[in-house]
Image: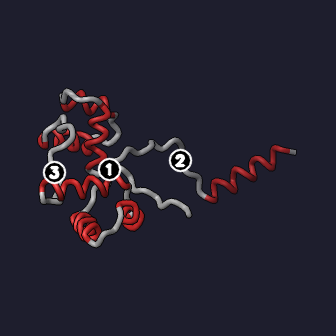
Amino acid sequence: MPRCRIRAHYEQLSEFDRGRIIGLKEANWTNQRMARHLSRSDATIRRCRQGWVENSRVQRQYGSGRPKATIDRQDRVIVRSAVTAPSSSLSTIRCSTQTPVSTMTIHRRLRERNLRSRLPLRHLPLTSAHCRARLQWCMARSG
């Protein structure tokens, strides 16, 4: 029997799924059966159930993880400088905003606001008339 695909590790359980886990456990489902049914790992099911038993709650605890290196005001300055000069690099944005963070942090803040880099235009696109004229020029000189 093929194993079901486990979701990515960063996707959180919804409140609905947490309630389903508690309800299915009270209906005497095993952890493996629930994991297959909800497409989650056994450890996720066990941790959710353990939180219910110990704390009598299923809400997610917020505040875990490393705090952001920039504040909202710095984020707005980064985005503004990227929008006003779209061809600038990450290092020039970092220097112009005078934020003491890495270029990867600048990149992350721009991605959070759906700002992505654009490749510069390498050459002008040719029209069909240009292509025909180039083909005729090559054919005239090939023979």
Side (left or right) of 96 relative to 124 = left
Residue 1 position within the rendered picture, expressed as x and y whole percent measured from the top left? 56, 64
Q: What number of labels is visible?
A: 3
Front: mark 3 or 2:
3
- Residue placed furthest toward the bottom: 27
Residue 131 screen position, x and y as percent:
66, 54
Residue type at mark 2 is: Leu
Mark 3 or 2 closer to N-term? Answer: 3
Find disc 2 in the rendering and name its residue: 124
Label 3 sits on what residue type? Gln
Q: Nearer the viewer, mark 1 or mark 2?
A: 1
Which image quarter: residue 81? Answer: top left
Find out whether the residues at labels 1 and 2 contact each other: C-beta distance under 8 Å: no
The colour scheme used to paint the residues is: secondary structure
**Residue under numbered circle 1:** 10
Q: Which mark is residue 61?
A: 3
At horizontal 24% and vertical 27% (from top left) the residue drawn is: 95
